[in-house]
Image (spheres, rainbow, N blue to C red):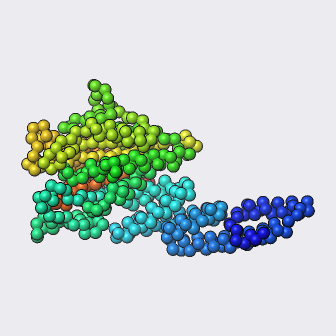
Amino acid sequence: MDFANTLQFVSSAVLAQLREAIGAAKAYAADNVKEAELLLAKLEKENERLTAEALLAIESAFSSRSPEMISSSIMQCCSMMMEEVVEDAKIRLRKLVTEDIEAARDEHDKEQRLILVGTLAQYLEILRNLGDKQLRQFHNELQELKGALRVFCRIRPMNKRERENHDTIAVEMLDPFTVALDKTATDRQVFAYDTIFPESSTQAEVFAECRSMVQSVIDGYNVTVFTYGQTGAGKTWTLYGSGSEPGISPRICEEIFNFVQRDSEKLDFSVKASMIELYCAELRDLLNKAKDHPKLEFKGYRQADGSVGQRLEGMTEVPVASSSDLAQVVSQGLGSRKVRATAMNADSSRSHFLLIITMEMTDKETGRSRTGKISIVDLAGSERLGKSGVSGEGQKEAIEINKSLTALGDVMMAFTQKAKVIPYRNSKLTQLMQDSLGGTAKTLMFVNISPSSSNVDESISSLKYASRARCIENDVQTNNGAGKKAAAAARK
C-alpha cells in the first residue's frame, strides 16, 4: 500500500502506541510487520517535519507580536497536542500582555495608547480561548487603561423634519476622537471624547465599545451605561434600537447569557432584572404588578472600602434564566414607560428609565460567591419649552426633567471644581446615579446629538455637559474588595 499521499500528523502518544503494537506483533511473528514498520517510519518523519514547522511558526508569530499569527500558531500546536509548547506560549503571551499594559500606561499619545489597548484585547481573547486563569486580572487592568468613566459622542443622521426645513449640517467629525460644531460662520467649537460615532455608525459598532463590560460584571464590578442629549437626539435608539437593529441593551442581555453558557462548567449563575422609572420626581417600579406599590427608598450602606453608598430598596427583582426571559422583562418595562409627542419628537421619553441586571456568580470548586451589576440608564431628553411646544402636563414633565438634569450637571460641576461636598441628594436622579458618577462603577456615557443647524445650540450644550463628565474620576472596585485608588496606595 502507498501511504505517502495519505499521511497526516499523528501525536507522539499514538506513535508510541504504534511502536508498542509493532513490538508485540514481532514477538508473535505476525505477518506484515515490515509494512507497519515502514508506515511508522514515515509517520515519525512527517511528525518531525510538522513539529518543526509548528515551532518555527510560534517563534515567527511571537517575533512579529501579531495577535492573528500568535493565535493561528497556538491553535495549530493545540491541534497537534503539543501541550508543553502551548503552555510555554501561554507564559510568553502573558509576558507580552504585561509589557504592553505597562507600555500603554506610559503612553501619552491617545491614538497610540488605543492601538496598544486594541492589541491587548486581542491577546486576552487568545488567553480566554486557552482557559487562562490570570485572565480576570488582565481584563480589569485593560478596562482601567480604557478609563473608569469613558464618554462617547454619537451623531445621528438628519431626520425628515430637518430635511424638510432645509437645515444644513453643522457638525463635523474631525477624527475618531474629535467633533466640531459651527455655531456661526465664524464660531467653530471643538470637543474631544473617547470615541466619536458618525451618522453612518451601526448599532453593532457602538455595541463593540460596550461588550467587554459584561466580563467586568462577571468579575464582580458594577457597570453603568447611560445616554444624555436633547429630546429626539437618538438616546433611546442607541440603547434599545429596533427588532432588526437592536441597540446596546438587547445586545448586552444576549451577551450576558453567552457568558453564562461559556462559564457554566466552573460557575453557577443567578441573574435578576429590575426596571425603574423616575417620572416627575417620583420613582416607579415598572415590574411590580401589585395595585399598591411599596415605596421605593434610598438607604445608605457601608461599602467594601469603608465609604457610604446609596442603595434603592423595595424594587422588584425578577429572576431570568435566558436571554429570551430577560428580553420579555425588558419589553414589559418599556411598555409601561411614559412617552409623549412633542414638536421635537413624536415619541419623546418623559421619564428617566433604568434597567438594572444583577448577577451572582458562585465558584463550583471553592463555593465562593461574588456579585456584579449593570445599570442601563436612558435619561429623558433635555428640552426648551418654547421649542418642544408642550403645555399642561407635558410642561410639568419637561420642568421636572430639566430640574433633574440640572442637578446631574451640578454634580458634574462639583467634581470639576473638586468640591468637598458632592450634591447627590439634590435629586433622586443623582442619588440613582451616585455609584456611576464619582462612585465605584465602570461607566460609559453616550452623548447623543443632532447634526442639524437648527439644533446647534442644544448640541453644544449637550457636548459641554459631557465634557464636564470627562473630568470625573471613579474609584472602581469590586463588590468584595477595595477600590483602585486604595489598591494603588497599598502597592506603594
- Total marks in image: 0
Res. 11 image quadrant: bottom right
Which quadrant of the rendered structure holds the N terminus?
bottom right
The residue at 80%/70% (across/down) is: 38
Task: Give the residue at x 11% y 58%.
Answer: 165
- Vertical side of 193 occupied by 426: above or below: above
Left or right relative to 464: residue 307:
right
Please report the residue visible at 42 percent of the width from the left and 64 percent of the height from the top: 118
Relative to 48, residue 344 above or below: above
Name, please, the residue furthest toward the top.
Answer: 292
Q: Nearer the viewer, residue 158 or 144?
A: 158
Q: Position of residue 10 (x, y in %)?
A: 70, 64
Residue placed at 66% from the left, 71% from the top? Answer: 50
Task: State left or right for residue 353 relative to residue 90.
Answer: left
Q: Nearer the viewer, residue 132 or 202?
A: 202
Which quadrant would residue 114 be assigned to in this image? bottom left
Report the side of 27 relative to 347 (left or right). right
Quadrant position of residue 315: top left
Out of 399 and 246, give the one closest to the viewer: 246
Q: Report the front residue among 243 and 175.
A: 243
Residue 478 visible from this viewpoint: no
Residue 353's spot in the image, x, y percent? 27, 42
Query: In this rendering, would 177 be left or right of 61?
Result: left
- Residue 390, compared with residue 76, is above or below; it is above
Return the residue found at the far front.
1
**Residue 137 seen in this snapshot:** yes
Q: Quadrant of the C terminus?
A: bottom left
Report x, y in % for residue 47.
70, 69
